[in-house]
Amino acid sequence: MSLWIALAVFVAAYVFIATERIPRLAAALGGAGIVLAFGVVGAHDVFYSEDTGIDWNVIFLLLGMMIIVGVLRQTGIFEFLAIWAAKRAHGDPFRVMVLLCLLTAVASAFLDNVTTVLLIAPVTLLVCQRIGVRPEPYLIAEVLASNIGGTATLIGDPPNIIIASRSGLTFNDFLVHLAPLIVVLLVVFVVLCRVLFRREFEADPRQVAEVMDLDEREAINDVRLLRRSLIVLAAVLAGFVLHSTLHVEPSIVALLGAGVLVVVSRLSAGSYLEEVEWETLVFFMGLFVMVGALVKVGVIDAMAHWLAGTVRGEAGLAVVVVLFGSAVLSALVDNIPYVATMSPVVAQLVAPDGPLAGQTVLWWALALGADLGGNATAVGASANVVVIGIARRNGYPISFWEFTKYGSVVAAVTVVLALPYLWLRYL
């Protein structure tokens, strides 16, 4: 009975989120409430279990970085970067999109992609307002670029961290094996942007001329706070890079950074807490509870084992199934819980006594499928949910289907291109 309740609730909630018949927060919390009320999951499952519970590392990483962004906003740095980007691109909307997307992709390789979009999204909103274009396409393009760029390294996308912990792969392993493909995919992505968003590249000439006459340095209104904020941010980013060496979770690093910055900034709580996307955080919690219910009743585990059983010891078939299966499933559920469930299955396949012993290509297929497939829908990756929340909060709502219209094309093209890369390089 629990199996059917968990499955029905998740499907219903997903339909409501996709159709926007009711607010996405209501759908997520309503679904979480039902699985709790029927006893599919309990308090321990929700709050304490690593397999079925809320991923507090994700929640508190987001909270810490949102507070840091809130303090940074008070310095005028986002206005500075917006004017700089617009002037560097000479006010051309397509050049602005390319510049912001490439900046986002590169940053996402060395930060986690959620942190990157939290920092870049405010800049995007400002630069789009400055040159007179709709910000929605630019925000969508940036989060897609963030998920692609984050695939290149161990710390760029949360699923990669899970894969690394299960497989023993290092930061350099990810860089050597995935970064070459990601560079190619980013070039393809820029071409796709020109085609997909071709109707969005008409700026207001008067506003562009006004931007070109601005001095971006005048946007900085608190140099002392900016210096302190950048020092703290640099320390936080160093903590992210060294978290495996320091044995400190990124969420702890973010919270410590936020705490230090709050103390040294001496700002009122309201000024920086305004930037916290409380609705996004609670939505994540509801989503984690529903996916946790699917994990507990065995739905996701059964799907993962079905994928494993389908390959029958054939490396080529295994790569195809894991790559495309991961892409499809990561489009439907957040790729973090999916990879957490699928990683043990891949570990069994490539173990010394497994049917595909030593075939590390399966780890790369899992990473590429989950990370790139997460671009397909608005709930496929954490960064997607965060950007949509920021857009809605600033008065630029992005619907589930508007995101999916662009994201599904990018996901399909990039995943398809990943297959010949894996095949030619490893098989």
Image (cartoon, rainbow, N blue to C red):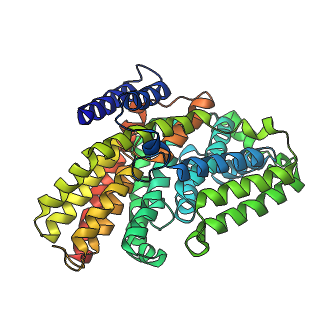
Q: Please name the residue shown 20% across and 56% down the image.
A: 305
Compared to residue 65, the image places residue 18 above or below, namely above
Taking the image as drawn, is residue 321 in sight?
yes
Compared to residue 248, the image places residue 67 above or below, namely above
Viewport quadrant of the N terminus: top left
Residue 339 screen position, x and y as percent: 36, 56
Which residue is at the far top? 21
Residue 165 screen position, x and y as percent: 43, 69
Q: Please name the residue shown 56% across and 39% down the image.
A: 281
Q: Is residue 397 left or right of residue 68?
A: left
Viewport quadrant of the C terminus: bottom left
Compared to residue 180, the image places residue 321 above or below, namely above
Number of marks in picture: 0
Q: Is residue 124 left or right of residue 1?
A: right
Q: Is residue 200 left or right of residue 368?
A: right
Residue 266 screen position, x and y as percent: 88, 47
Q: Nearer the viewer, residue 143 or 188?
A: 143
Residue 139 lies in what quarter of the image?
top right
Q: Please name the residue shown 32% across and 62% down the image.
A: 343
Q: Nearer the viewer, residue 27 or 33?
A: 33
Q: Please name the residue shown 18% across and 64% down the image.
A: 318
Residue 160 screen position, x and y as percent: 43, 63
